[in-house]
Amino acid sequence: MTTTIPVQTGAYDWDPVPALAIAVYGTAGPQGSKSPVGWGRSRKTGKNIPLMKESSAKVKPWRDKVSAAITAAILRGDAKPLHGAVYAEITFTMAKPGSRPKRRRTYPAVSPDIDKLERATYDAITTAKAWEDDGRVIENHNRKVYPGEHPDALDQPGAVIRLYTLTGAVS
């Protein structure tokens, strides 16, 4: 998936060809909400601390799929690990509920929060070693869409991930 999309953000001179472009299929899991599951003892201080776990069971499978897709792209030679500043563009295709109109465009202005989807995806990109840390992202654009209701929408749930570097930057 090597799509050329001119990036016109105004502030930076991004390379118009993504350094990494992949499609990942699966239900995106939001990361960030945690639920308490009990108490444990800190190894450092010995004090009692709350034990927390992710509220969504979808986080780990989503992160695994994203990480595997990026690792495969790097191994195939379709992408290289990125260095320097990064512009991230992610289009999350969400499953359209059956209660939504079929013949009219609708918008997924419902849970999960887009920032929590982004957090899980960025952590998976870090795990795949596509960049050192998500702190490399200095500009981004993320969107949630339903299948067939946006040019970047997939035909089923998943995400299109494009990562751009600055023009002339060595990666």
Image (cartoon, rainbow, N blue to C red):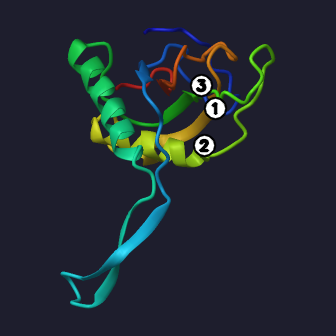
* Residue sitting farthest toward the right: 104
Specify the quadrant that holds the N terminus: top left
Q: Is residue 29 above or below residue 152?
A: below
Amino acid of disc 2 = Ile
Q: CA distance from mark 1 to mark 2?
A: 7 Å
Q: Residue drawn 30% across and 29% down?
A: 81
- Labels 1 and 2 touching (C-beta < 8 A): yes
Say if residue 87 shows up in the picture.
yes
Q: CA distance from mark 3 to mark 2?
A: 26 Å
- Per the rendering, the mark at residue 144 is 1
- Per the rendering, the mark at residue 32 is none
Amino acid of disc 1 = Lys
Estimate how packed mark 3 is, as few (under 14), some (14 to 19) or many (20 or more) residues with alpha carbons within 10 Å. few
* Residue sitting farthest toward the left: 43
Q: CA distance from mark 3 to mark 1?
A: 26 Å
For the residue labelled by badge 1, is the local secondary structure a helix, a strand or a loop? Answer: strand
- Labels 3 and 1 touching (C-beta < 8 A): no
Q: Is residue 24 above or below residue 135?
A: above
Q: Residue drawn 49% across and 41% down?
A: 137
Query: Label 3, on which residue?
Result: 13
Looking at this view, is 152 or 140 the one in front? 152
Number of marks in the image? Answer: 3
Which numbered mark, 3 or 2, is in the foreground of this view?
A: 2
Query: Label 2, on which residue?
Result: 114
Across and down, in percent, residue 68 comes to 27, 28
